[in-house]
Amino acid sequence: MATHMHSDPTHGEDNVIETTRAGYELLATPLLNKGTAFTEAERDAFELHGLLPPSVTTLDEQVSRRMETFQGLSNAIEKYTFLRDLQDTNETLFYALLAGDLEAMLPIVYTPTVGAGCERFSHVFRKPRGVFLAWPNRDRIETILDNPRFDQVEVIVVTDGERILGLGDQGAGGMGIPIGKLSLYTACAGIHPATTLPILLDVGTDRRELLADPIYIGWRHGRVRGVEYDAFIERFVSAVTKRWPHVLLQWEDFAQANAGPLLERYRDRLCTFNDDIQGTAAVAVGALLSAINITGVPLTGQRIAVVGAGSAGCGISRLLMAAMIEGGLSQEEARACFYLVDRDGLLVQGQSGILLFQQPFAQDRARIAAWHVEGKIGLAEVVAHARPTVLIGVSGQGGAFTEPVIGEMARHVDRPVIFPLSNPTSRSEATPADLIAWTGGRAVIGTGSPFPPVSRGGRPFKVDQTNNAYIFPGVGLGALAVDAKIITDGMFMAAAKALAEMSPARQTEDANLLPAITQLREVSFRIAIAVASRAQDEGVAAAPCEWGELISRIKSRMWTPAYRAYRRAGAGSSARSG
């Protein structure tokens, strides 16, 4: 049944929603349900009397009631399940609750709790959300996506569930990631939830526990790989670009063997990016640029060790190297600043098994010959000889930053910058409390997952969570505002610099590197401006505009959760489909 909204349904504050839905059908539609907030007149018009208790309440009153329930739950996974149920019942209320206390909600709807949500996805599954495109239905992809209920889609987050956070293959349970990411697009950047679509590409799973689990909801088959996998992805991308020529497509949590190649294959074909590679890189660069305000060492003077030379580690290094070159270093000078350590040790030129995307960061053998290290060069040797000023962890190996390594780093660097970015929390390379203790309180820290406050100078201090939520919502908002044809590395550089410009450490040396989580909506707005402007400068904006109009476009796209007046279809003038 049709739903109509006066003015554009996806952009701005709409006054009237017109729909033919009524009774249980209206209450069962998450984007339309207002629960007890339906007015007496609306209950008359939509046959809701008797289906709701007689009291009419406000959105604020509903938020208070749900917050009381949320706070009374005993653990994070219960809270995750509660919020997922609320999202599938009343999306306006769900987002109003998020907006009311984003700092408390973010670790539940996304890292670290979303990892547990993915692991238990089949067991907590209630209602379908998004689209599951399974291998057996590969010939039906276009038909599935052609459903009219997807007409408004502007943003897609897609995963195949193979590398969920640091937890590995979660099969169909990986759907929790696109759902969580898109909820942050809305909560942080105001992207209207009606325009978002989470997609799970179910090509099987190699996790035996899932295949043996009688409750598992995915396709019970080993993962499809190779030529058949590539053909499946091509069929999916072709269907998406045919259905939505101007869509923003975000790749999420693909395995290393696929993540980089898929990005390179499609990045110039549509408006697309990989958040694990590019979003992680941008937030890390933004945090490091902010740390310079504390350490006093310019970016061009940094020596950077990265543990985990996969797509994320190399993505961070690539963007950092570009920033160093912008800062005045030659390409060779910038490359020499990086020490990437993988499972086989430090990447060195001529070493067997180095992948194409890793090659730019392989150290010159002549430069490390004086180290006189025989065999594998591990992190301890890198720290002892290279004396890095920055240590970044994206290895997924909990505890990889040991006390001897951190102590050695702190012996040579006054204010060591240490970013253990792996998540969830159990996969973090170190805890902030340990890093503070091992460096005598001198470490400048950013983590991938939230941790309790640490004691610094006798006072509690909240360590920055370098969450991708600082970056990707604003990147998406900016790209949509100017109808960007592609997402460039320059747009991510602009996002990183915009984030750094908002750093509290620019004003006070002992302040945080990043703005508070409560400021994410303002952060997304600022980043959207920077990204859209860069897209126009680089000539990839299909709908460029003047500065004033750009600001207006971005603001008009930032939806705020609020109940609007309803009118039954046929009771007044018609409007465009919503």
Image (spheres, rainbow, N blue to C red):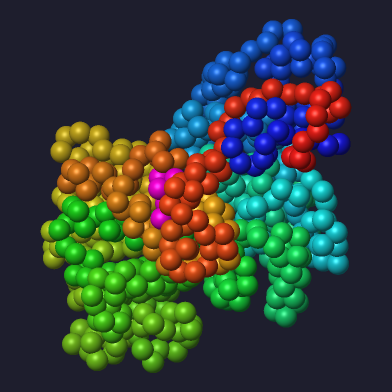
Residue at 40% in and 45% down: 523
User: In terms of depth relative to the viewer, which is nearer, 339 or 575?
Assistant: 575
Quadrant of the snapshot with the C terminus: top right
Where residue 260 appears, x then y in whole percent? 54, 73
For residue 571, which quarter of the picture?
top right
Judge whether residue 20 is colored magenta. no
User: In terms of depth relative to the viewer, which is nearer, 453 or 159?
Assistant: 159
Residue at 24% in and 85% down: 368
Instruction: Give left or right: position of 389 versus 230.
Output: left
Residue at 23% in and 38% down: 455
Instruction: Give left or right: position of 536 versus 369.
Output: right
Look at the image and give the residue range highlighted in magenta: 523-530
Q: Is residue 255 above or below residue 483?
A: below
Residue 176 visible? The answer is no
Where residue 439 appears, x then y in whole percent? 18, 53
Residue 304 visible? The answer is yes
Instruction: Give left or right: position of 445 versus 535.
Output: left
Q: Is residue 41 above or below residue 389?
A: above
Where residue 289 appears, x then y in whole percent? 27, 58
Instruction: Give left or right: position of 18 versus 270.
Output: right
Chief SS of the magenta region: helix
Quadrant of the snapshot with the N terminus: top right
Where residue 233 appears, x then y in whole percent? 71, 70
Residue at 82% in and 56% down: 146
User: In terms of depth relative to the viewer, which is nearer, 353 or 492?
Assistant: 492
